[in-house]
Amino acid sequence: MTDPTQMSLVDAANMVASKEISARELTEACIAKAERMQPTLNCFISLDAKGALAEADAADAALARGDAAGPLQGVPLAHKDMYYRAGKVSTCGSKIRKDFKPDHTATVLERLAAAGALHMGGLNMSEFAVGPFGHNEHWGHCRNPWNPEHVTGGSSSGSGSSVGGRVVFGALGSDTGGSVRLPAACCGLVGMKGTQTRVSRYGVMGLSFSLDNVGPLTRTVRDNARMMGIIAGADPKDLTASAMPVDDYETATIDAEIKGLRIAVPSNYYYDGATDDVRALMNASLKTFESLGAEIVTVEVPDHEKLADLAIALRGPEGAVLHQAWMRDRPDDYGAQVKARLEPGLAISGTEYVMSQQIRPRITQRFVDTVFADADVFHAPTINIPVPSIAESDVKASPNFPAAIAGMTHCTRPINYLGLPSLAVPAGFTDNGLPASFQLVGRPFAEATLYRVAAAYESEARFCDHAPS
Amino acid sequence: MDSQTMRDLVMYWQGVTLDDEAASRLAALSTSVGKTLNAVAGGSMFDTEPAHYDRALIAMAERSDD
């Protein structure tokens, strides 16, 4: 057999279910890959080989007994090190929580385990999920599998690096301003930030409960749809998770057709500062959509120059509440840039915070009315510049750090305030050889539409067939 | 707001010490956020309901894939 770590998540699950490969064989291959790649990628904070093999043996034993295979039966996954597992250390990528053992398990991890998934360990991440490049002063920078001198994107850095590096088949990240979509984009992966209330956050480290989203990073659209279908939905332990029924995302990806689909592209904001190579790749992706029968329409997006301030008025105080005591008592235990990015929450007034909450539905409604009046989905770059190198982006708390962060998150951050689903999709390679990506944005709860559109594109463009050497 | 006032306020309300650069950055941010909210909110919010965001999102959904 060729290297089993190169398979898609769906193929891996199917092969385990049909006993063409055992969960143990698959897991041993992933562990060997992890041990080989860790010195280069630094994608794991903790690798639990013994635990993963025990779970693999249990998965094989269940199949041997004749138990029905789950949709992720025997498939090794790993997750950003902020998804709590009772009794297991969850560092949150920090020095402050380096020994923290939660007493409860995240709902999304329970759902993945119930589907048969295995847990390989905790993945590197930006400290406390603050940082769009993936730098980490405490656990070391995570590195891009396409070129280790470049960033992975953050804050779900290890999720992007490990899945892109063909170490695990899928990973959860979290997205408060782009932290699923950015590493997906930088590492050539598919990444979903669902509708704001689509996935439970119970047992997940918080940064901003109004903007935090749990989402999967995978190599293919169908892989992503399968993971998202498992984790989405209401949760009695998290009353912010919507009771809205969950569509069959995976079915939407099969033999996907988009003839007659209308795709909106922005005439303002999203291409501000875009490089020529990114523009060319975005245009090429739109040509592909047209060749599949889609119609492109242009829209002027409303309110976008204001969304950064509105988002910080939410994220700032919510993050500051979580971190205030440590910022007061242990300021030197934060990385310099992380501390600097948490400080704005100390300066937002209560009335400003509530006002930003109160007007949020109105702002979202205005975007939906404007963009989706004549279109089914919205298309824009995920990042409108090439993936930067670690050296050029490691600005710490120097005076230009706000500009560096604003540039990296320019296209993702607005969507978090708008609360809309957004799917990052590989779109080729920029002149520096690193992946490029567009995002598809939909109406609230239109995740199935995004998966259908992305699957149609993927079946034509086939960037999922490219893997790092 | 000037940076010294910002530094004093953050110390008074939050007990957190800001350096000069952070105080200056936060003072500028505070001004920007205030202007943005005034522009977007557009006057009195007396008649607004508390934001029930999930309900608003559900209302904006269009179940085309059902």
Image (spheres, grey):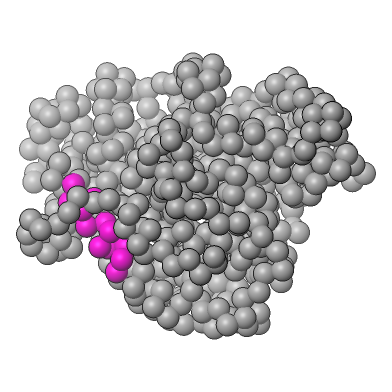
Percent position of residue B42, x then y? 12, 64
Q: Which quadrant is home to the N terminus of chain A?
A: top right
Residue nearest the viewer, comparing A367 with A410: A367
Q: Residue at image x 56%, y 43%?
A: A231
The answer, for residue A27, to whether it is visible in the render is no
Q: Residue at image x 18%, y 47%?
A: A354
Residue at the extreme right of the image, as rendered: A1
Percent position of residue A389, x then y? 55, 49
Name the dominant secondary structure of the magenta segment.
helix
Percent position of residue B28, x then y? 17, 49
The total number of labels drawn is 0
Q: Residue at image x 65%, y 56%?
A: A250
Q: Which residues are magenta?
A: A354-366
Q: Is residue A428 magenta?
A: no
- The answer to which quarter of the image holds residue A122 is top right
Residue nearest the viewer, comparing A387 with A185: A185
Q: Residue at image x 67%, y 47%?
A: A164
Instruction: State left or right for residue A389 relative to residue A251.
Output: left
